[in-house]
Image (cartoon, grey):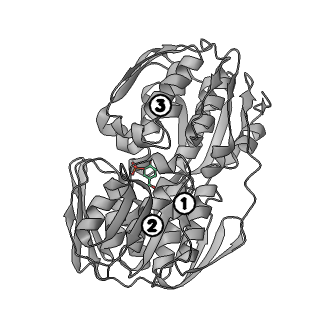
Amino acid sequence: MTTPDISDLHGPRRARPASGLRGRLNTSPDKSISHRALILSALAEGRSRLDNLLDSADVLATAGAVQKLGAYVERAGPGSWIVNSGGAWSSPDSPLDLGNSGTGVRLLMGAAARFDLTARFVGDQSLSSRPMERILTPLRQMGVQADAQPGGRLPVMLTGRAPLSAITYQPPMASAQVKSAVLLAGLGADGETCVIEPRATRGHTETMAPLFGAELSVERDGTGLIARIKGPARLHGADISAPGDPSSAAFAVIAALICPDSEVTLTGVMTNPARFGLYQTLQEMGADLTFSPAGERCGEPLVDITARSSTLKNVEVPAERAPSMIDEYPILCVAAAFADGETRMRGLEELRAKESDRLAASAALLEAAGVGVELAPDGLVVHGRGPGGVEGGGLVATRHDHRLAMSGLILGLGARDGMAVDDVSMIATSYPAFLDDLAALGAVIGPV
Ligand code: S3P
């Protein structure tokens, strides 16, 4: 497997105040869909062709892991992969290192659970501090043996079982990773495995697994859903092309909103409602956004989004919306800093279990820019400074968290004194083209 070089991001950077950002960007491919494409094709028998996958460190870690588990994985060009698999995984001869990727490690533990194998899962400093018990609890109920470090942390030694016992499981937190791990394990269970979500999270596993031949049904139930998958299943190969990532598009969109005299278009953005909560929120804040239909990919409708400089006003973001924008709160905080009035966000306890404690880290980011913020156990209140009112000038501690690094730099583009971040290296985990894309729009992000 040849891998692209995505390692030129390292060290601190400073974003200078910007105006007149202009241009059209191809949206970076969706990370969630890229992980699932590699995992499902490695579980399938036969050949899959995967196009427009995200070439990021997280996705490469998943590709490396499925190769170690027994699939043949070839990178055919930028974002293009051929996966050939016999559909049966075996014990890898070295630990599976998923780097920074919670999605990679958690979905792979679920997918590996159905095989007679033993694997050791490891990750970087950030991933090793994140909770894994949320995955191991249902997997143990299905028959897996798993040993974790104190507090349910990595490294995890997991021994699968064939067949697993089918279960009905209601995750105690809204998590697409937990739902997906159980559904992927359910492919190897003896009967029907069912996941109940009182609040629906992103449904990419449910939409993609049937493309590989899984028998899966979804019943909507108010704000929630019930997903059922039939095991034991034999999957076949499929051709997948990933849509643009609404989470990555958010950075350039908000840069255009907060910088004067700007107009930026992001093409091919996935509009899945379980991923689009930020855009609904921005519209409520008065953002000048235009959405033009742009076809579909992987069964997902796409739009081109044009964002123009806007006068934003404060909003109250309801707790029920959190699952549909769970990765977007740091960048929403940036938009809220440039809005008039107090923006309130609730239902955010899960942010504390992300690549960093994103609730505390987002508050610290705003404080470093001179923006007032109130931090609660499950929410934030941002005291917006209005257009042109954010001072900036500080240094953001990015805490090994890519979304904080990108959010800090976007804030700097709109702030009077710019803004610095201590390290951009983690940006390679989700959006390696971030600095190039911003430069193409006219932003100046350089040495501190
Ligand atoms: C993801 C689910 C979310 C999200 C992550 C990607 C996925 O995590 O934060 O970036 O692809 O399933 P949780 O399941 O922990 O909410």
Q: Which tag, 1 or 3, sits closer to the chain's start?
A: 1
Dot 3 amino acid type: Leu
Front: mark 1 or 3:
1
Disc 1: which residue: 98
Q: Nearer the viewer, residue 3 or 383?
A: 3
Disc 2: which residue: 108
Against 359, residue 294 (above or below) is: below
Q: CA distance from mark 1 to mark 2?
A: 9 Å
Residue labelled 3 has its Cβ within 8 Å of some atom of ligand 1 = no
The label on residue 299 is: none
Query: Could you say where residue 444 lies in the image, as x and y percent from the top left?
Result: 78, 30
Q: CA distance from mark 3 to mark 2?
A: 34 Å
Query: Could you say where residue 413 lies in the image, as x and y percent from the top left?
Result: 68, 25
Dot 1 amino acid type: Leu
Are dots 1 and 2 in contact, CB under 8 Å?
Answer: yes
SS assignment at label 2? helix
Q: What quarter of the picture does the N terminus occupy? A: bottom right
Q: What quarter of the picture does the C terminus occupy? A: top right
